Image (cartoon, rainbow, N blue to C red):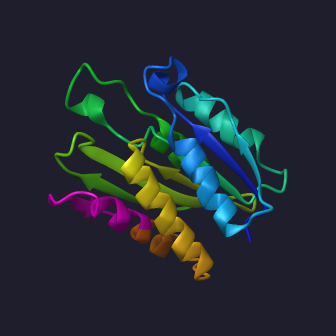
Amino acid sequence: MINKAVIIPTGDEIMTGIVLDTDSPMIMQTLLAMNGRCIITRHEPVADIENKISDTIKSFLGQNTDLIVLIGGSGGGHRYSSTLGKDFTHSSLESILHEKYSTELYGKNGHMWSKLICGRLEGAIIINVPGPYQEAKAAIEAFRKSYEEGEKDLKKINMSMTEAVKEQYSIKFNAQG
């Protein structure tokens, strides 16, 4: 059971108020539906700086944290347009997680590239969800379903989340795990 969770929104656009964080309240609702007594901390938004994201994650380890959810920063829009910022959530997770599974989605939906990662570190499950609301909702609901069904395999959890994100679009994605 998830008794203690942390939500960490990432991205300069969230920090500056250009984009409103509507994902955190929705994720809180999902976690509370899983366990009405869950203690949830929503951390202030973290800048798209790899070591800041990694340090923020690490600051919650060793505190009986069961789940850490990172929002946003899973895209790679800067690879396609110099007007889009760089995202570092996925590289931060890759650098600190030893037990993990990830999937990359490629598409032409405005997100263009997304990397979803599920991992474990010091007893906590750590996942990231894309920033767009409908993708974040699909991913966290898929996580919830997998978790409530007792799934422990990171690959299966990740693939469930990936499929849920893909279902939000009528276009074809290429997924690489």
Residue 125 appears in the rendering:
no
Residue 122 vertical placement versus 94 (above, below)? below
Please tell me which residue is depicted at 20% across the width and 59% down the height of the picture: 173
Q: Is 20 in the magenta?
A: no
Q: Position of residue 52 (x, y in %)?
A: 62, 28
Q: Position of residue 70 (x, y in %)?
A: 56, 45
Please identify the quarter of the rendering in which residue 151 is found: bottom right
Q: Camera-side residue: 11 or 39?
A: 39
Q: Position of residue 125 (x, y in %)?
A: 65, 61
Q: Position of residue 112 (x, y in %)?
A: 23, 43
Q: Camera-side residue: 33 or 61?
A: 33
Residue 46 vertical placement versus 99 (above, below)? above
Please tell me which residue is depicted at 43% across the width and 54% down the height of the picture: 116
Which part of the image, by quadrant, shows the N terminus?
Answer: bottom right
Please tell me which residue is depicted at 64% across the width and 45% down the height of the picture: 7
Which segment is the magenta one? 161-177
From the viewer's perspective, tell me whether residue 93 is left or right of residue 121: left
Q: How many marks?
A: 0
Please identify the quarter of the rendering in which residue 171 is found: bottom left
Please tell me which residue is depicted at 34% across the width and 48% down the height of the picture: 114
Which part of the image, by quadrant, shows the C terminus?
Answer: bottom left
